[in-house]
Amino acid sequence: MKLNFWAVAILILGSLSANGQSGYWQQEADYKMVIDFNHKKHQFKGSQIIVYTNNSPDVLDKLYYHLYFNAFQPGSMMDTRSRNIIDADARVGDRISKLTKDEIGYQKVKSLRVNGKKVKYKVVGTILEVDIRKAKIQPGQTVKLEMKFEAQVPAQIRRSGRNNKEGIDYSMAQWYPKLSEYDYQGWHANPYIAREFHGIWGDFDVTIKLDKKYTIGASGVLQNPQKIGKGYSDVVEPNKKDKLEWNFIAENVHDFVWAADPDYQHITHTAYDGTILHFLFQPNERTTENWENLPKVMDGALKYINKRFGKYPYPVYSIIQGGDGGMEYPMATLITGERSFGSLVGVSVHEWMHSWFQMVLGTNEALYPWMDEGFTSFASAETMNYLRQEGLLTGDVSENPMAGSINGFSANHAGTEVDEPISTHADHFTTNRAYGIGSYTKGSIFLEQLQYIMGTSAFGQGMLRYFDEWKFKHPNPNDFIRIMEKESGLELDWYKEYMVNTIKYPEYAIDTIYDETLVLRQNGEMPMPLEVVVTTQKDKKEVYYIPLRIMRGEKPNEWPKDVDYNLMEDWPWTHPTYTLELNCGIEKIKKIEINPTINFIDLDRKNNIWPREEEEEEEEEEEEEK
Ligand SMILES: [Zn+2]
């Protein structure tokens, strides 16, 4: 068969755009670590073996490790950043600059070998730079990286550390030398300044030798419960040693966390689908009752989440009191525990949702924090609404749990001078506010709007397909939007480009109305398909749906049967106005509204409504003056 040039070109282009990352590959790092912990000095000695497989097409002549604890030293990048940013995180502030020698954190590498060969390395802040020009790693090659290290646990300032403000002894996050990820965008040796992470998929086998007074909660499954007890096993083998040796295995993860305290109470709960849930907290009048009520609610949440966002794939999940707020890790979270019940459920649901959008769909959250925090926030809002609906949590059920976020974002942040495009690397936003609102709020609105554009059914299918096709990989924004394009049959690249790379937003208005003609105006810089809802004097609802021409299609009608639904001509985004012929005259109309269900950002909502509410007020004022 002979193909002409254009046929070949179309075939190639077609196959490229039909896939996100074509020829996808990812590195693998399997960890085996043994930690000997000295709780009197808050120090530990560790040995680490990483079996590292280079699945990239590249020869590697260097390696990078993260040494996160080194951030907790006066003058570090995290310290300096915190003292210079205009809206510092109150938890950090200038606290790092005041740490004494005994309070700082450090990770010291004592030796490093690649396949038995000593290699040169250099510590540069929180990054270990390793020169392996004499032990290059070939494509497809598996090597053994053997390290001995020593560490001191810093006073708790951000995420990890000792003696958090609720008195948890050890919050052990970012605690071990962690190999940096190398992917199609190269190395990701980001210095740690307290933001986001990106890790290598692999299995973790971790043994912690720690004074026997402590109870540990951790990522993974405890392998030797009968030697430990502590709520992991009812039968315990006698042990005369001072230390217990805890062995956890976590498979198919990209990080490992643990926490320890002598006072932990440990509740185990088997969820409806067999997932084992661990709850570890320090009992007191501010915790006990709420934590005892938590398992039932989390079990209920899992039912909804499994169905809506994909089946939780790990055997266990541990909710552990520790850290400084809420922080997600594979198969576990560290949260502060002295909260109201609503707040405890809220943080637990949010952190667990990260299991779907960070721990299983391992997006590079330093580059795309909105795909993690935003998607997680969207899913948490829905899950919390579900819990209220099921009576597992008190509070009002909302028709659209995202409406408040959309209104708040539109009114207070969108397009202000603080606003930055969410394509900004997490570390490099100018303010914490721009990072926070961009990642959490705009990221969650990203999904709500997409659901509105695609229709709820295609969106739901798309979210499940995204989970299924990209679990245990590193999807990027294009991978995600391609799934949604396939599921909806719509072209959606324009949507991703506007939302991710710009700070342009929709602003639609009712311009004029006469007889049966309605003129709509686009004042904003970002186009959106519109739903215009007309309520007649007899309270009948008519929906006029105007797709965008660049969507190359439209969503199906999902309105209730009694709503009069009208699919209109496309709106070409270049056209400032759009003329709509209504089914009835102005005299029969009570109200016209664009986006009444608040599914997308609109910089000025007042002009979405006819008759204009402010005009009414003005008329009233005029009447008063008379
Ligand atoms: Zn989060």
Image (spheres, rainbow, N blue to C red):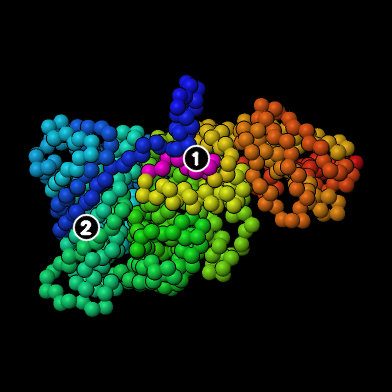
Q: Which residue is mark 2?
A: 206
Our reading of the magenta stretch's main secondary structure is helix
* Residue found farthest to the bottom: 235
Q: Of label 2 and label 1, which has the lower sequence position?
A: 2
Image position, residue 300 (x, y; %):
49, 67
Q: Which residue is mark 1?
A: 482
| Residue 140 visible in image | yes
Specify the amino acid type for callout 2: Val
- Per the rendered image, the range of residues in magenta is 474-486
The secondary element bearing badge 2 is classed as strand
Residue 81: quadrant of the picture: top left
Image position, residue 542 (x, y; %):
78, 48
Residue 9: assigned label: none
Q: Residue at x 12, y 37 (%)?
A: 119
Image position, residue 137 (x, y; %):
19, 36
Q: Residue at x 17, y 67 (%)?
A: 244
Categorize mark 2 by other alpha carbons within 10 Å: few (<14), some (14-19), many (20+). Answer: many
